[in-house]
């Protein structure tokens, strides 16, 4: 068996690795001379996890008597050659945690000397197919006594050392394919992501929501305060923008008569990369007619709680060593209530004094636009003093109009909208509000955004005349919410970095 070496440098293989690859390429050349080097005619019939689930409870005597034949395929992760007998471990993607493994036993008697000798030349990382009968070894391990074994895919490049995997974190992101081979935890993470998304889809369908698809290329970016990616459509001879949010298109569907819609969508925002930001990310946005933001909060809470339970079987999980309990009702604070709770040294007078707030925010190093009013200043202070302390699921409600250009204004409180943001472990997870369906009010809000953009706010919205035209046909009263799927999965998988839950996160280009 070839000795495995660890490689943590993507651009510069070690001499040992080069020699290993040369040896494997020579084996591949020999395979080509014998016939088809990469066959595609082997069809496995069994998965490792299913085999263990069904037969682990049987003793060897019963297995031998039953002569249970299985046909498996997977990547060889372990190999032991002991003269006339050999052992190998195949890995496949079976099981809820994608950790399916089954041991193969090969011998001159059972497998045939020729096939066994050929197996001895196979390498760790090769993908094999095997047929045989089940038995248990002296140590009680369920295994396949192999009658036939085939090399399906030759691995030319050696895997990292099995005890260390990819120890370089950046390399784990850049070469996710290797990370998935070597790390059971990484495979579990993405199995959990799939389970959570499947739960959300089921829940939305069960509650009468229709899944739809809206454009990713927009003539006018809208639906969020963000800096877009700009591209160009040659045939139409026009500048276009990658979607920053699907909101305005989804609400056009409310105008069209679909009363409950949702989209699991990719958004693109030309912003910085951090442990909680990726320029391309996944959200679930949904809109319902004849509801308000209070209904939305209750519904969003239920969606998330169900996703947690469906993924892990319990509403109580641990994140970064600290318990997070989704069974309890989510807390609700206004922006000022949250500041008062987590930064109680501020007085009510100070929190409503624009000059004081500006001076205080300057101490935190916050850069403010000169157009920012008291509401925007209060929100900025909340972000500096309270946001990071919101560990348990908490709704922050009653956002000011000036930072909520698409939200319905309160009928009873001047300058306030019916809007919330949901925070957990100090991060925003969701954003929702009663929708603004007054076309004249929305037009005026857009004009304010244009003024802010002219004043230097790169994230301010454009004026969308077609959306105003849609509202003029009449949109029913409604509520809408966006849930950040990547951030939610971070919680569900105890992942500290958003790149841990994105299969192929954006990285700087390799030199």
Image (tube, rainbow, N blue to C red):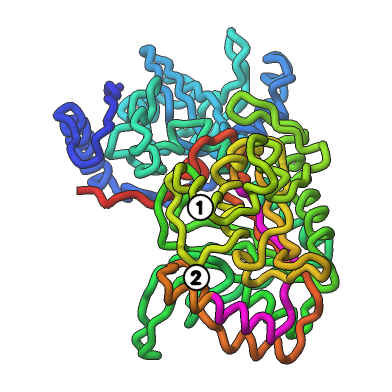
Q: Which residue matches tag 2?
A: 460
Q: In this rendering, does residue 71 appear at all?
A: no
Q: Position of residue 219 (x, y in %)?
A: 48, 82
Q: How far apart are marks 1 and 2 (CA)?
A: 20 Å
Query: Which callout, 1 or 2, points at the residue further toward the start of the chain?
Result: 1
Residue 342 in the figure: left or right of residue 310: left
345 is within the stretch colored magenta: no
In the picture, residue 139 is in which quadrant?
A: top right
Label for residue 256? none
Label for residue 358? 1
Give the magenta part as a residue range: 428-448
Considering the image in quadrants, where does the N terminus appear? top left
Residue 497, compared with residue 353, is above or below; it is: above
Residue 418, compared with residue 273, is above or below; it is: below
Q: In this rendering, does residue 311 appear at all?
A: yes
Q: Which of 178 and 219 is in front in this view?
A: 219
Q: Where is residue 9 in the image (x, y as percent from the top left)?
A: 24, 35
In the picture, residue 363 is in which quadrant?
A: top left
């Amino acid at each position: 068996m070839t000795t495995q070496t660890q490689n943590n440098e993507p651009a510069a293989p070690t001499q040992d690795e080069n020699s290993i690859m040369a040896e494997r390429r020579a084996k591949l050349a020999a395979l080509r001379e014998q016939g088809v080097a990469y066959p595609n005619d082997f069809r496995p019939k069994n998965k490792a996890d299913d085999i263990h689930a069904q037969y682990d409870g049987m003793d060897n005597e019963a297995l031998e008597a039953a002569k249970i034949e299985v046909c498996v395929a997977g990547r060889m992760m372990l190999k032991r050659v002991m003269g006339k007998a050999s052992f190998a471990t195949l890995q496949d993607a079976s099981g809820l945690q994608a950790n399916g493994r089954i041991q193969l036993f090969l011998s001159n008697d059972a497998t045939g000397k020729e096939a066994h000798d050929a197996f001895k030349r196979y390498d760790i990382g090769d993908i094999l197919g095997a047929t045989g009968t089940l038995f248990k070894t002296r140590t009680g391990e369920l295994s396949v006594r192999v009658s036939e074994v085939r090399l399906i895919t030759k691995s030319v490049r050696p895997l990292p050392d099995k005890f260390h995997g990819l120890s370089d974190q950046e390399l784990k992101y850049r070469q996710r394919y290797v990370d998935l081979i070597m790390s059971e935890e990484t495979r579990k993470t993405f199995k959990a992501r799939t389970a959570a998304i499947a739960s959300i889809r089921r829940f939305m369908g069960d509650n009468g929501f229709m899944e739809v698809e809206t454009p990713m290329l927009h003539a006018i970016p809208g639906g969020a305060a963000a800096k877009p990616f700009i591209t160009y459509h040659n045939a139409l001879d026009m500048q276009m923008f990658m979607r920053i949010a699907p909101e305005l298109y989804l609400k056009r569907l409310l105008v069209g008569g679909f009363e409950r819609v949702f989209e699991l969508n990719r958004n693109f925002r030309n912003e910085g990369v951090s442990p909680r930001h990726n320029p391309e990310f996944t959200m679930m946005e949904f809109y319902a007619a004849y509801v308000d933001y209070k209904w939305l909060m209750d519904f969003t809470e239920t969606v998330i709680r169900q996703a947690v339970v469906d993924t892990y079987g319990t509403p109580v999980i641990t994140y970064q060593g600290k318990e997070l309990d989704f069974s309890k009702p989510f807390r609700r604070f206004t922006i000022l209530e949250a500041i008062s709770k987590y930064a109680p040294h501020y007085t009510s007078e100070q929190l409503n004094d624009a000059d004081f707030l500006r001076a205080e925010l300057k101490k935190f190093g916050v850069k403010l636009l000169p157009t920012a009013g008291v509401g925007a200043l209060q929100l900025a202070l909340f972000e500096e003093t309270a946001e990071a302390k919101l560990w348990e699921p908490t709704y922050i409600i009653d956002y000011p109009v000036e930072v909520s250009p698409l939200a319905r204004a309160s009928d009873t409180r001047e300058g306030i909208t019916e809007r919330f943001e949901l925070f957990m472990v100090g991060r925003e997870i969701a954003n929702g509000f009663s929708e603004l369906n007054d076309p004249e009010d929305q037009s005026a809000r857009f004009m304010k955004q244009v003024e802010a953009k002219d004043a230097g706010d790169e994230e301010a919205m454009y004026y969308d005349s077609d959306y105003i035209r849609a509202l003029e046909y009449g949109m029913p009263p409604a509520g809408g919410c966006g849930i950040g799927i990547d951030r939610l999965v971070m919680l569900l998988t105890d992942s500290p970095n958003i790149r841990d839950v994105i299969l192929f996160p954006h990285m700087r280009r390799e030199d």
